[in-house]
């Protein structure tokens, strides 16, 4: 990495002064950019290098009426990673909230311990951690920074994903918190939320922390991945426990408090130890993606911002890697994570515009047209290697996958494809379904600027397959009914059955589109497991949460239980509840089903806002409030991590599989009738 640090500094003005000089002034310096200043900008007006201090004069452009503060933890950092702490401030008081004025701008000055006068480039950091104000790459504007390209960084850090990258196996995490005392406010749980992309399962794993401070959890992964496990109560300096898990790993860690009072993780073995410099570096690009999400300029202006942020990403990546001496593997993982987060920023810009109330939505709007044009995304995503399997190790990959799968150019098509034959136009046939699949592939290729179905495009289509699999199963039953319909001739039965998109005539074509061996293998395994199920229901899993379900059954014997898991902080949850009030009144008249609403709150007593909402919208209905820690156990128990989520329990105490369970109330009558028919057949 040293050669690239040298490359970074190449061409910068070396600020050399005679030994007798007392101070050097850098007027109107340039910076690569600032981070984490939402809807604003933190700018450096002047830098004064002196023997006694380095003085930096700032201007903060921030929305009028918004509050901000500068913490006494801020520091300057030079190209070698040395830190120069804050000494004093003028124009504001540190650690004190300041209201941005009507004119938006606030000038202030910070004095730091003196940087060496030969310093060529440095950073301003408010504190260590996510969300800190940063100004990166501050240098003399007369001399342009020369940054390495991602290709140059990759060439200097050769590493290739091993052949067994896609292997399904378990991971075991064992750990201990030194000095643990639950009475002293230490956390009692570790929680991991993640998405199993090959199964479409959104999972929560909960690990209890024992009285001696030890914990252990085992889960299954399909490929190496970075995981962030959240403490239910944050430790000083540590909100999350970061691990990198490869299939088959056993990870042993110790969480220890340092002399500065901050907790850190010590990795003793496993893949986490192999990449601990990366995990401990705190390298994150969330500030880059948030800039794109909050940006409300035109698509052309967004392209310019994306280019600027890409340079910031390169700068931040290579400087942090050099300071922490990343290995080639760590560097490649960091580069993959940087690419994922940059791409997510691009997609978040489009998402932000989609929800921008001020955006012109007319069909001929230039903005709207650009965001539906695959070429717009292709220009911004051209640098991302979407075939690189290391991208999937990023903790943000599943979010990016979702953004691309449902991007505007894909979901903004002109309606279903029509297939016309001698009998006239047909829609929703096997041919139209497969044609839509090919059209989606073409859109994804255009968005990612490639001519083949890369790994990301195939992963998107894999998710489409998982989304539609349930419908294909139901349609298979429909096809069988058509084939046995005595009212039709044999030829009519064949023709009508062939027009039904179902497992037998659609699923094989989806699998054939997966040129990547791992995707094809997982698709076939998924299909085989679903077909091997002897029943569409399964027994309640063992464990304490089952007692809650059994107690509800005892109160409502002979009824199906439809459970709505929701929360006050979930807008879609409240929207579904409020829009279904009249329908729920009708359902309440039935004697074969009971609706139950379970919400998680900080305590079992629930907040004042919760009780007010229940009184207004869920009066006289079965509502249950449980602590968030217990809600997490139910999420693990029923295998979901997003809300609203719905579960259906049969009168004899079995869980209904996703093919037939009630998924909300919008289509309740149809789904309930289908469930009853399936139950009768079984």
Image: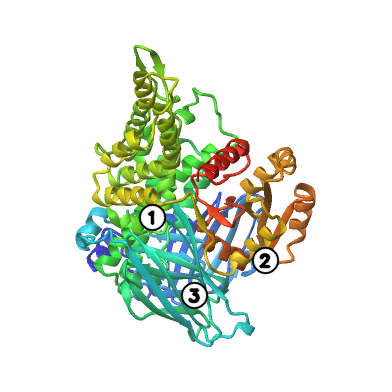
The residue drawn where x is 67% and y is 66% is 602
Of callouts 2 and 1, which one flags the residue occurring earlier in the amino acid sequence?
A: 1
Q: Nearer the viewer, residue 261 or 254?
A: 254
Q: Which residue is mark 3?
A: 85
Q: Is residue 541 visible?
A: yes
The residue drawn where x is 57% and y is 44% is 663
- Label 3 CA crowd tier, 10 Å (few <14, some 14–19, many 20+): some
Of callouts 2 and 3, which one flags the residue occurring earlier in the amino acid sequence?
A: 3
Mark nearer the viewer, 3 or 1: 1
Q: Position of residue 248 (x, y in %)?
A: 31, 70
Mark 3 element type:
strand
- 405 horizontally vs 576: left or right: left
Q: Which residue is mark 1?
A: 312
Q: Position of residue 84 (x, y in %)?
A: 45, 74
Q: Is disc 2 in contact with disc 1, using a CB cutoff of under 8 Å? A: no
Q: Is disc 3 in contact with disc 1, using a CB cutoff of under 8 Å? A: no
Q: Which mark is residue 544?
A: none
Mark 2 element type:
loop
Q: Which mark is residue 602?
A: 2
The answer for how far apart the CA atoms under marks 2 and 1 are is 39 Å
Residue 225 vs 214, above or below: the answer is above
- Label 1 CA crowd tier, 10 Å (few <14, some 14–19, many 20+): many
- 128 horizontally vs 312: left or right: right
Q: Nearer the viewer, residue 78 or 206?
A: 206
- Label 2 CA crowd tier, 10 Å (few <14, some 14–19, many 20+): few
Q: Is residue 281 visible?
A: no
């Amino acid at each position: 990495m040293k050669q690239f640090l040298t490359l970074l500094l190449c061409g910068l003005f070396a600020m050399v002064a005679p030994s007798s000089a007392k101070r050097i002034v850098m007027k109107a310096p340039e910076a690569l950019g600032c981070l984490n200043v939402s809807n604003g900008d933190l700018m450096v007006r002047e830098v004064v290098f002196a023997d006694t201090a380095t003085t930096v004069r700032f201007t903060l452009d921030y929305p009028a009426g918004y509050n901000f503060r500068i913490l006494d933890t801020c520091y300057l950092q030079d190209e070698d990673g040395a830190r120069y702490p804050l000494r004093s401030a003028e124009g504001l008081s540190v650690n004190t909230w300041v209201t941005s004025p009507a004119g938006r701008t606030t000038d202030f000055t910070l004095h730091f311990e003196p940087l060496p006068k030969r310093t060529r480039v440095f950073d301003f950091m408010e504190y260590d951690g996510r969300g800190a104000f940063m100004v990166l790459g501050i240098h003399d504007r007369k001399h342009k920074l020369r940054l390495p390209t991602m290709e140059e960084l990759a060439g200097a850090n050769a590493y290739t994903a091993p052949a067994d990258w896609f292997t399904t196996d378990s991971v075991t995490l064992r750990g201990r918190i030194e000095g643990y005392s639950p009475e002293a406010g230490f956390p009692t749980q570790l929680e991991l939320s993640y998405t199993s992309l090959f199964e479409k399962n959104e999972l929560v794993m909960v690990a209890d922390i024992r009285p001696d401070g030890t914990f252990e959890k085992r889960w299954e992964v399909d490929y190496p991945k970075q995981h962030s496990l959240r403490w239910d109560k944050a430790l000083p300096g540590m909100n999350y426990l970061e691990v990198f898990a490869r299939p088959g790993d056993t990870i042993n860690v110790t969480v220890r408090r340092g002399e500065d009072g901050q907790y850190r993780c010590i990795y003793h073995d496993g893949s986490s130890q192999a990449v601990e410099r990366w995990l401990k570096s705190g390298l994150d690009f969330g500030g880059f993606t948030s800039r794109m999400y909050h940006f409300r300029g035109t698509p052309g202006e967004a392209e310019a911002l994306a280019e600027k942020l890409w340079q910031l990403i390169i700068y931040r990546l290579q400087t942090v890697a050099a300071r922490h001496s990343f290995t080639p593997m760590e560097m490649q993982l960091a580069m993959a994570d940087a690419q994922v987060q940059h791409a997510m920023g691009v997609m978040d810009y489009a998402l932000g515009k989609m929800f921008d109330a001020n955006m012109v939505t007319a069909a001929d709007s230039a903005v709207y047209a650009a965001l539906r044009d695959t070429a717009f995304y292709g220009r911004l995503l051209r640098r991302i290697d979407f075939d690189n399997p290391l991208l999937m190790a990023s903790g943000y990959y599943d979010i990016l996958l979702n953004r691309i799968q449902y991007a505007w150019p894909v979901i903004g098509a002109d309606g279903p494809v029509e297939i016309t034959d001698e009998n006239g136009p047909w829609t929703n046939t096997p041919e139209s379904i497969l044609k839509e699949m090919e059209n989606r592939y073409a859109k994804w290729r255009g968005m990612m600027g490639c001519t083949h179905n890369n790994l990301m495009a195939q992963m998107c289509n894999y998710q489409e397959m998982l989304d539609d699999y349930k419908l294909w199963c139901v349609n298979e039953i429909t096809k069988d009914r058509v084939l046995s319909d005595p009212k039709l001739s044999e030829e009519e039965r064949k023709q009508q059955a062939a027009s039904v998109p179902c497992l037998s005539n659609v699923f094989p074509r989806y699998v054939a589109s997966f040129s990547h061996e791992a995707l094809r293998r997982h698709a076939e395994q998924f299909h085989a497991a679903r077909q091997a199920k002897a029943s569409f229901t399964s027994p309640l899993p063992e464990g304490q949460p089952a007692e809650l379900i059994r107690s509800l059954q005892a109160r409502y014997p002979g009824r199906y239980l439809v459970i709505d898991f929701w929360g006050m902080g979930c807008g879609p949850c409240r929207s579904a509840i409020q829009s279904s009030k009249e329908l729920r009144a009708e359902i309440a008249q039935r004697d074969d089903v009971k609706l139950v609403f379970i919400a998680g709150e900080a305590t079992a007593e629930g907040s004042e806002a919760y009780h007010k909402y229940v009184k207004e919208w869920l009066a006289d209905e079965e509502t249950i409030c449980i602590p968030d820690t217990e809600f997490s156990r139910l999420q693990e128990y029923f295998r979901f991590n997003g809300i609203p989520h719905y579960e259906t329990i049969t009168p004899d105490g079995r869980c209904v599989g996703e093919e037939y369970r009630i998924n909300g109330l919008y289509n309740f009558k149809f789904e309930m009738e289908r469930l009853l028919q399936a139950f009768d057949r079984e």
